[in-house]
């Protein structure tokens, strides 16, 4: 008997979620599978509104049996609050048998008390592995801004440069978000970014096999260099650098060209090329020989065996020899795979704090200095930049900054997930 084809869609809910008392009003309409667990539903809301998953959350509702329920996450918070743990509850358990118009409340951050009114609009289907943001309005509130009233007051201050606390508000926003308030627009809603964040979660919850095309896109920078060195090597300048024509070609063909960099035909003006070249040598895939950059024995082998190259890169990137670099790498992977990471200008400080919490010290027993953390942070950034985690056309943006999840390709996500699985 022939096997039944896998279902292409699954039952889903259309939900309108509004954050109470926000001015301007902040809301989203989501289409999500009815089988979401409450922790997954929580993360979907975090992704859609741009929250950063820093605080406790609770769902309050009357379920289909008429029972009033309060569900709190993460689970370890339930001991003090006398509530149900979130991990044991599925969204359909709360909405099964209820009609359009049924509601529940989702509260995030019990200090600021961001109450989200969730209304069931109707019943539908969604493609397997997908969640969708159908529409919405206005940017999600800034994390830790105090609640709806305080956030409204913050926006009023930021809109008035003559306000006596304007500069203080700008500096606070800079500390929280990593950029000046001149770039902050509370009315901006990026639906594509919201859907990209939801897609990112879906890839983690409902993983799909890696395709040959995805693997090839991720390892492309490595293969490009190895192919350039085949069969006779890459001729270097008398000072031992790549020749300008090859540097320019690498920047153009690997999608790294940037007008800010100018011509980008010297290694000292094209850092992605210089960093990648150095890593290929450190990783024993290329070596210098008589004024040329030539393939090593391993470099020749992995060039012909894409699966082996993928596995080798997972080991090199995911398991660097230095324990502090390895720990920072896993921090970065978690940031890449979550709806939000720390501000770009704060990553080294977060790395430093994490190393201190893990007990890393210098040989003299002192805490890891910030200068060391900066070096570790930069090493991790460039190790990850050696593989292409970006969607096509946006490669140039990744090496310099913590990527927004809207720029991660499916293959890039699968690479990072496998890094974590091998940790």
Image (tube, rainbow, N blue to C red):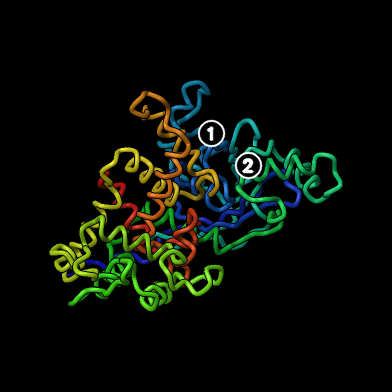
Image quarter where the N terminus lies is bottom left
Q: Give the numbered dot on residue 65.
A: none
Q: Which residue is mark 2?
A: 175
Image quarter where the C terminus lies is top left
Going by the image, does 233 lie left or right of 28?
Answer: left
Outermost residue on the right side: it is 162
Question: Which of the two residues, 77 or 128, is positioned nearer the viewer here?
Answer: 77
Residue 412 figure quarter:
bottom left
Question: Which of the two residues, 223 or 238, is positioned nearer the viewer here?
Answer: 238
Q: Decide: marks 2, 1 in contact (CB < 8 A)?
A: no
Question: Which of the two residues, 308 or 396, is positioned nearer the viewer here?
Answer: 396
Q: Is residue 255 above or below residue 162?
A: below
Q: Position of residue 303 (x, y in %)?
A: 19, 69
Q: Is residue 368 above or below residue 284?
A: above
Q: Position of residue 299 (x, y in %)?
A: 18, 65
Outermost residue on the front side: it is 238
Going by the image, does 165 lie left or right of 60?
Answer: right
Is residue 45 visible to us here? no
Going by the image, does 264 lie left or right of 136?
Answer: left
Q: Is residue 251 above or below residue 333?
A: below
- Decide which of tag 2 and tag 1 comes sooner along the chain: 1
Query: Which residue: 69% across, 54% down?
Result: 184
Q: Which residue is mark 1?
A: 56
Separation (CA) of disc 2 from disc 1 = 22 Å
The local secondary structure at tag 2 comes to helix
* Other-residue count near label 2 (Cα within 10 Å), few / some / many at <14 / 14–19 / ≥20: some
Q: Position of residue 373 (x, y in %)?
A: 43, 40
Query: Which residue: 36% across, 46% down?
Result: 329
The local secondary structure at tag 1 comes to loop
């Amino acid at each position: 008997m022939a096997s039944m084809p896998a279902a292409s869609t699954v039952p889903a809910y259309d939900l309108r979620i509004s954050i109470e008392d926000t001015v301007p009003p902040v809301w989203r309409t989501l289409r999500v599978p009815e089988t979401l667990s409450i922790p997954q539903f929580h993360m979907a809301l975090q992704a859609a509104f741009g929250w950063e998953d820093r605080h406790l959350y609770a769902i309050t509702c009357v379920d289909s049996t008429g029972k009033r329920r309060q569900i709190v996450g993460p689970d370890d918070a339930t001991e003090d609050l006398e509530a149900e743990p979130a991990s044991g509850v599925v969204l359909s358990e709360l909405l099964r048998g209820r009609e359009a118009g049924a509601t529940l409340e989702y509260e995030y951050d019990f200090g600021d008390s961001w109450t989200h009114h969730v209304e069931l609009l109707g019943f539908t289907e969604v493609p397997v592995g997908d969640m969708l943001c159908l529409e919405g309005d206005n940017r999600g509130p800034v994390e830790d801004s105090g609640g709806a009233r305080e956030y409204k007051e913050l926006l009023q201050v930021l809109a008035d440069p003559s306000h006596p606390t304007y500069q203080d508000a700008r500096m606070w926003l800079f500390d929280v978000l990593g950029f000046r308030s001149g770039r902050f627009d509370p009315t901006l809603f990026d639906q594509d970014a919201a859907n990209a964040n939801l897609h990112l979660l879906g890839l983690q919850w409902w993983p799909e096999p890696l395709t040959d095309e995805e693997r090839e896109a991720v390892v492309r920078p490595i293969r490009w260099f190895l192919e350039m060195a085949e069969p006779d090597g890459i001729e270097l300048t008398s000072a031992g650098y790549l020749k300008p024509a090859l540097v320019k070609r690498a920047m153009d063909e690997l999608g790294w060209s940037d007008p800010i960099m100018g011509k980008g035909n010297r290694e000292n003006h094209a850092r992605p090329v210089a960093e990648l070249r150095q890593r290929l040598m450190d990783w024993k895939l290329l070596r210098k020989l008589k004024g040329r950059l030539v393939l090593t024995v391993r470099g020749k082998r992995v060039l012909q065996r894409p699966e082996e190259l993928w596995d080798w890169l997972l080991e090199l990137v995911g398991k660097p020899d230095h324990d502090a670099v390895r720990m920072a790498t896993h921090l970065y992977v978690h940031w890449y795979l979550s709806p939000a990471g720390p501000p770009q200008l704060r990553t080294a400080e977060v790395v430093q704090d994490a190393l201190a919490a893990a007990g890393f010290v210098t040989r003299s027993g002192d805490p890891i200095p910030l200068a060391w953390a900066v070096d570790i942070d930069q090493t991790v950034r460039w190790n990850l930049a050696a593989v292409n985690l970006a969607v096509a056309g946006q490669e140039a943006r990744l090496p310099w900054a913590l990527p927004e999840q809207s720029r991660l390709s499916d293959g890039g996500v699968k690479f990072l997930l496998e890094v974590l699985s091998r940790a």
